[in-house]
Image (cartoon, coloured by chain):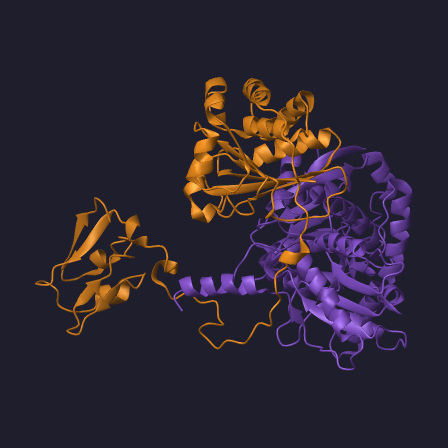
Amino acid sequence: MVREMLTGNASAAWGARLADVDYVPSFPITPQTEIIENISSWIRDREMNAKFVTMDSEHSMITAAGTAAATGARVFTATSSQGLLYGMEMLYTISGWRVPLVLVNVARAISSPITLEPDHNDILAARDSGWIQIHVENCQEALDAVLMGYKISEDERVFLPVIVNLDGFYLSFTREPVEIPDQKDVKKFLPPFNRENGYFRASKPVSRGAALLGGTGYSFFKYQMHLSACNAISVYKGVAKEFKAIFGREYDTVERYEMDDAEYVIVMSNSFATKGKAAVHIMREKGHKVGLLKLRLIRPFPADDIINELLNRKGVAIIDQNIAPGSGGILYNEVCGCLYHSKERPNILLSVIGGLGGKDISQAEFEHIIDTIKKYHNKKKVPIKPILLFTEEDMKVTNNIIDIAGI
Amino acid sequence: MIRVRFHGRGGQGIKTASRILGTAAFLEGYYVQDAPLYGAERRGAPITAFDRISKEPVLERGIITNPDIIAIGDETLLNDAAANVFQGIRKGGIFFVNTHYEASHILERYCLPECKVIVHDVTDITINTVGKASVSATLAACICRITGTAGKEALINAIKKELKSIELKDETIDKNIEAAILCYDKMSEVPIETYRFNPVSGPKIIAVKHYLPPKGVAVIYAKGNTKKRKTGNWRLFKPCINYERCVRCGICFVSCPDGCISLDTDNYPVIEYANCKGCLICYEECSAKAIETKREVRTW
């Protein structure tokens, strides 16, 4: 084991290298490109033994990834933002093939207006595609999630592809100290993929993605995908336990920060959770009983764990770093949905939208969220519309943008 | 936690400077985070890079708007408002500039608050020792010393590691180390008052109203894409209309990709030179040969 300063991109690439992948179809896109650059230079230098192919688009890339996985190869690929959307058709197709592989998405907000910094409208657009989704907060988690991803994906009870999501810029280009595990420990955790069931063999063809008309068979197999995705919760927990036993780091489906006696809870995901933890820490110093629940496994949605953590709290704010125009925050709706039948659910579930296009969330904004929950605490009517984290100063900046655009 | 923000230009070694500082502090056992920020990746464009160095785990991310140290790799950026090098400068903070000027000159010329201005001609030392003006190792050495985050051994190991990773030759790396040590020895450690969050200055959250188009839609109407930048100074050749030959066909008017040609009340074309980039499409397209080109000496 060595400790090195690594970017989120390099960490994800190390995950693929340690997983001893066989095949890496690739296509560049900012802010992901450094991942495939790392891998291609390792293959050039014979530090990694895999086939690296540059494709003509993300659509072809994801197709190649799925087909290679269908031959029993261990496959890694990566993309970002517009690239994920361009390959979207194949995300659904491949999950229906029931082939295991890991794709890293480096989150970047979606055009238009076009930008480079992260929010989660790209990755959450893929939330219903049948892929397992693990969202990470730091560079270490990026490496570890890729390793865990293979183990979950290749488990027969799941057999669905996995996306690991890491934030562009905030992780992709940011270096942090990262533990690179020893190859022999990784081998113990993640043995070579056992290619027994239904893989292509010479003179033994199989057909995946067959036509099924009339709806009956279609319903059955789609529901099988749902059940397999649901299995991924217990499989994830088992894999996390094994991971902890070998590497010492613990990754549950959700992460609890200062939750034991928290009256007010902020729910959020990904790299901005670090900012949230810092804010909670400062609010705790001031005597506020605030905690943070970080969502790590987004698909399948770990409803039971979320319910357990949020029951009997006075108020909860869900920060969505995404926006569904005409609806609001995507995760807010999911969290509300799983709490409905619990009598001890929190009085207040506040929907907050922040960090769009990588916009910072300041300490003052986190404190504003908690103040707002408290304001509604004893009132019957709580707004279900989302609050956008946007300040007077932000409006000045925007007015300047509008002015120089000549409107 | 110490927060360092570097400013420089693409190709100057600013990202690598932040990485050398980061690695040196990491080797000394600190928790570290470093990251560069650049838009279009080209030589000469302003670039920023950040380091957070702490004895505790770092619970911050992204750009640093409240630096304890601002390190300027290229003094010409001090005059570039868009580079925003003074953002978050504060009383007691450290402002390091790579320049041949005296600190007092910088302090007065830019009306800085009571911060500690430290100057050193890093470029000069680098050119004399290495033969090139890439200040990655030398600038990092200055900041290592000023912050006291890394000793010479960690600094040298960090320079080796980072310069090797960008595939420099051993000989060049050795010269960089030599230059860096010269800089390191010239500097001395300065006590740093680190930034603490001040709740009083918190911004006010507002409810964003709905705006009908065009205000509520991200569309640019200004010629040259912004009212503030006049693209006329990109011109090498200036198209000039000879109105005696013009047949008012309007071809130039519809061909101009920047909308810099309008029609007057008699339907004669008029060129707006403030934004005309001199692409000369109008000159190429004019069938009456009524547009001439003149070499632009100075736009304004």
- Residue A72 screen position, x and y as percent: 77, 50
**Residue at the outermost bottom position:** A380
- Residue B160 left/right relative to A376: left
Residue under the image location 69 percent in, 31 percent down? B25
Residue A195, compared with residue B122, is above or below; it is: below
Relative to the observer, which residue lies in front, B261 or B180?
B180
- Residue A14 screen position, x and y as percent: 72, 40
Residue A59 shows in this picture = no
Indicate the colour of chain B. Answer: orange
Relative to the observer, which residue lies in front, B237 or B104?
B104
Residue A7 shows in this picture = yes
- Residue A333 screen position, x and y as percent: 74, 73
- Residue A203 left/right relative to B50: right
Residue A12, compared with residue B25, is above or below; it is: below
Residue A151, compared with residue B143, is above or below; it is: below
Q: Which chain is purple?
A: A
